[in-house]
Amino acid sequence: MAKVLSGAGLRGQVAGKTALSTVGKSGSGLTYRGYDVKELAESCQFEEVAHLILKGNLPNQAELDAYKSELKAMRGLPQALKEVLERIPADAHPMDVLRTGCSMLGNLEGETSFDEQGKVTDRMLASFPSIICYWYRFSHDGVRIDVETDDDSIGAHFLHLLHGEKPSELHERVMHVSLILYAEHEFNASTFTARVCASTLSDMHSCITGAIGSLRGPLHGGANEAAMEMIERFESADHAEQEMMGMLERKEKIMGFGHAIYSECDPRNEIIKRWSEKLAADVGDTVLYPVSVRCEEVMWREKKLFCNADFFHASAYNFMKIPTKLFTPIFVMSRLTGWAAHVMEQRADNRIIRPSAEYTGEELRPVPAISER
Ligand SMILES: CC(=O)SCCNC(=O)CCNC(=O)[C@H](O)C(C)(C)COP(=O)(O)OP(=O)(O)OC[C@H]1O[C@@H](n2cnc3c(N)ncnc32)[C@H](O)[C@@H]1OP(=O)(O)O
Ligand SMILES: O=C([O-])CC(=O)C(=O)O
């Protein structure tokens, strides 16, 4: 007889093994393949971390240069995909666009054998910024942009396509940090979605498409967007405090706070918060950053709830003039590495994931004739 779990949401249950990351091991830490995320975010480019997660090692200079060149060469989009993107309306959610774009790429350049898993993942990594920005610029500005730029990094490629000009050094660095922080996080909801899909021996594009859908919700990746929608309503730190107290009294969920695994703090927060502060100084902000800090203070004082990775990402992205609706797609551009690495790990030692349910429905009963229902 299978054991019935008492806690909802499978909280605290070990659902499988991974060598990719540890989350909250001592209440607050995060490591990717044994490296502390703080050190990675301090000294690495996102492409180094993508290489670490997907290929197993931090690349040396020659390997990094080769990997970046390979990715650069994969930025173009097939005409049939552009045509699909052009038909998606401007008021669609960009996460839905990305979900469709990923799925369409699977139709055009599908994974025909698991030997291709590395290649199709790199292709997605290189082309997701193109997909999202091609649609965004076409539907919002009516232009068909050339997505094959020579930018050095994935983050710079994205910002260049979005704004039509190369980003500053500061913005490119913030993108590296942000993409590193979001890259991998053990058995979170979207990664678990990808692994469940992989366990049926499905293809990579299906696993990633499912994961995008799972990340979209405001309790997961969608929280950075929801946090932005909240903080932009606040006119000052005092106003933020007053509104937050009301929300807490009404027992509303405050997006960007709390975590299913971390018990003390989310280690990604202090890093992105520092960069948000730098960006605030860069743009001369006197509202959004102080409002965000006050929200953090109120939540800790009132509920002992801390900011997760999403909260200060909201102001950081806003300072870089990234439209709010594109916040969660950036998360996808990064987490794709973790998702794909988990798919590969699942495939390497697979058994179909199929838990049991505790039945809470009716006892066995006869089917009444239709005239008697
Ligand atoms: C990158 C990421 O995906 S990080 C997560 C992003 N998501 C969010 O920011 C959404 C807001 N946060 C939440 O909804 C939750 O904290 C989650 C989904 C992250 C974790 O959920 P859980 O593990 O179920 O939360 P947990 O069990 O710790 O909650 C404990 C209590 O704190 C409350 N709580 C948790 N987070 C919040 C919050 N953000 N605002 C208000 N109350 C909260 C819960 O309602 C619960 O209260 P109760 O005991 O009275 O029912
Ligand atoms: O681990 C989680 O549940 C959510 C999270 O922080 C992430 O996926 O980055």
Image: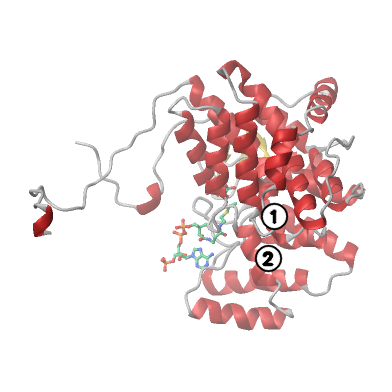
Say whether residue 18 is left or right of residue 131.
Answer: left
| Residue 50 x, y percent position in the rendering | 71, 32
Q: How is the image coloured?
A: secondary structure
Q: Say above or below: 268 vs 293.
A: above
Residue 128: tell me if it is visible: no
| Residue found at x 59% / y 23% | 111
The secondary structure type at the circle numbered 2 is: helix
Of callouts 2 and 1, which one flags the residue occurring earlier in the amino acid sequence? 2
Residue drawn at (86%, 53%) of the image: 163
Q: Amino acid at mark 1?
A: Phe
Q: Nearer the viewer, residue 219 or 296?
A: 219
Whole-percent x, y for residue 19 in the image: 55, 29
Residue position marked by numbered label 1 in the rendering: 327
What residue sits 25% from the left and 45% below the top? 4
Q: Nearer the viewer, residue 50 or 105?
A: 105
Q: Tell me: residue 92, above or below residue 5.
A: below
User: What residue is at 67 percent from the left and 39 percent from the top?
Assistant: 36
The residue identified by callout 2 is 228
Mark 1, residues whose alpha carbon is within 10 Å: few (<14), some, or many (≥20)? Answer: many
Q: Quarter of the image containing the N terminus?
A: top left
Judged from the image, the secondary structure of the residue bearing numbered disc 1 is: helix
- Between 147 and 318, the residue placed more toward the observer is 147
For disc 2, the neighbor class at 10 Å (few under 14, some 14 to 19, many from 20) is many
